[in-house]
Amino acid sequence: MRRTDEHTRIMRQKVVSSCICRGMTTEETVLFLAEKEVINPRTEQPYSITTILKDKTAIEQRWMDEMMSNISFHRSRVLAELRETKAAAWKTGHLSTVLKAIDQEVNLLGLNELERMGIEIALANLFKGFPKDIADQLKKILASKMKDKKRLKKSQNFITVGAT
């Protein structure tokens, strides 16, 4: 692919990406590009639906790949933004904003789920040497036993009243 073709594709996909984020259909995107005079430089015609569908597929796959590979980066950036928001809210006395930022920080970091995470880490370490299929089966059995135990515990909390 020539350099100018690559540049054209990148610029077109930027516009298509924006259209996706705005909830536009493929057909609406094609019309939008034509209205903005973003046309195929080789044919000097609007881009085809097929081209835009290929762009959408490539963009959505790229978003998915970026999300999965950069999740730690995104979390750290959001955490920094929450802490900045919290600091500004403290300075201005907006305590409701401080509390919201704290709540979002707790959710982002999973602080309410540390106990569950500790159990999952312990189980992962326990099953580390097992073949994957056996480890998965053991995890399912343990999960089933835990559900049964929780169900039994809940049923013991009820007071049964006999007929007199």
Image: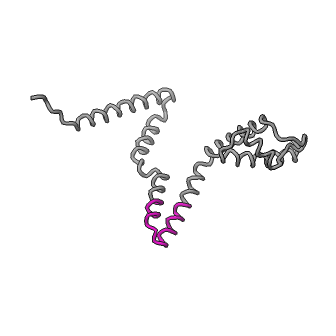
Q: How many marks?
A: 0
Q: Is residue 9 in the magenta section?
A: no
Which quadrant holds the N terminus?
Answer: top right
- At horizontal 43% and vertical 36% (from top left) the residue drawn is 126
Q: Is residue 134 left or right of residue 33?
A: left
Image position, residue 120 (x, y; %)? 44, 40
Pick the residue in front: 121 or 147: 147
Pick the residue in front: 122 or 103: 103
Which quadrant holds the C terminus?
Answer: top left
Magenta: main secondary structure: helix
Q: Is residue 99 left or right of residue 158?
A: right
Image position, residue 153 (x, y; %)? 27, 36
Color encoding of the figure: one colour
Residue extent of the magenta highlight: 81-101
On screen, residue 155 above or below 34:
above
Image position, residue 65 (x, y; %)? 65, 42
- At horizontal 46% and vertical 50% (from top left) the residue drawn is 110
Image position, residue 75 (x, y; %)? 56, 53
- At horizontal 49% and vertical 52% (from top left) the residue drawn is 108
Q: Single out the residue that lies furthest toward the left.
A: 164
On screen, residue 80 above or below 23:
below
Q: Is residue 72 left or right of residue 138?
A: right
On screen, residue 142 above or below 102:
above
- At horizontal 89% and vertical 43% (from top left) the residue drawn is 44
Occupied quadrant, residue 30: top right
